[in-house]
Amino acid sequence: MMAISTGPSIRAVCRIINQNSCGSGSICGIQNGRSLILTNAHVAGTSIGRIVSVEVESTGDKINARVIMAAYSDRTTADWAILETVEPYSKVEPVKLSKKRPTGSHYTKGFPRCWAMEPGDITTVSFKPPVWFWEPDAIGGQSGSGVWSDDDGFQYGLLTWQWGSHGAGQMTADIYTQARAQNTVGWAKPDGLIPLTDYDFDGLERGKDDPVVEPGFFSQTGIQDLPIWAEDEPTPPIDPDDPNPSAWRDYMIEYHRRLSEFHDRERTMLEGVNDTNDNGPGLPGLDF
């Protein structure tokens, strides 16, 4: 696997300072001139409107951002938040998230112990939907780091946990599903999955202003209103006389993907089945 030391997706990497704790994040969209940032709920908190400090590594800019959407559960694999910059900020081209399952090779970048690091390859160990397990291990401060594809550069994962000697994260495809359903239903957390703690970078005791992380889904907007998904980009119309068959193939793949997503959402709402075994993804339950 080829290392990506200067991959284009790292332009979106951010350090997130929340009181005296430090985590990571990535710019994934721009709305009304303000940047949108994906991170963990346990980094930014779940309180809509909470302000955190964001440092954009590629530019050195320091800006403020507020929580506009968050989901967290101590039972299921929900631990993510979307921030919007308080003031207009569009200096950095965003790297959008994918609704597709990851394939191929990937890399990540964040702030272990609040220090900037070079991008590093990850090696997939296994998938236990919706958790993605990989090597190497992850440590405090890396929470909220993006995981990007070597092939198309889009973000497919959100580094969130440690599992034994492995790193682990949520797939952005499952973040999208939870956001569309506006809840935290899903598969139970696998045994041994440990949330990464934010790195206490100044050694001070945490106080009453530390972020509040509560179970639930919190939002001031709908996920369909956020321009953060790669597959939502407009595509040029297909010319039926075009001799290139790949255009029709890609069109049909996307059509069936959206159809499958629709059916999954409807079945989730109507059936409420909770399958947490290892034999397949099953359907997320609606009992919590």
Image (tube, helix red, strand yellow):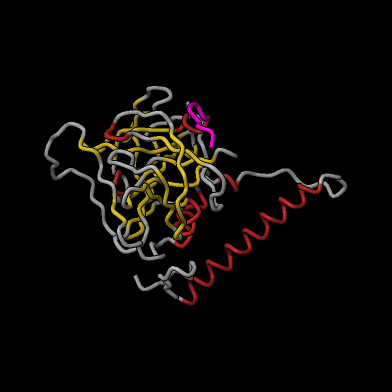
Give the percent coordinates (x, y) of residue 131. Answer: 42, 56
Tell me: 151 left or right of 281.
right
In which quadrant will I find the C terminus? bottom left
Residue placed furthest toward the top: 60
Tell me: 198 left or right of 175.
left
Decide if residue 31 is in sight here: no
Decide which of 48, 177 is in the foreground and name it.
Answer: 177
Identify which residue is drawn at 44% across, 68% down. 278
Give the percent coordinates (x, y) of residue 150. Answer: 55, 38
Residue span colored magenta? 1-7
Q: Is residue 228 magenta?
A: no
Tell me: 255 left or right of 17.
right
Q: Is residue 180 above or below residue 32?
A: below
Identify which residue is drawn at 50% across, 41% down. 106
Q: Main secondary structure of the magenta part?
A: loop
Give the percent coordinates (x, y) of residue 23. Answer: 30, 38
Q: Is residue 253 above or below residue 110?
A: below
Decide if residue 210 is in sight here: yes
Please give the count of numbered marks on the rendered protein. 0
Q: Is residue 90 above or below residue 48?
A: above
Give the percent coordinates (x, y) of residue 265. Answer: 52, 66
Decide which of 139, 188 is in the foreground and name it.
Answer: 139
Identify which residue is drawn at 68% across, 55% down. 253
Tell me: 3 left or right of 162.
right
Identify which residue is drawn at 74% across, 52% down. 249
Q: Is residue 5 magenta?
A: yes
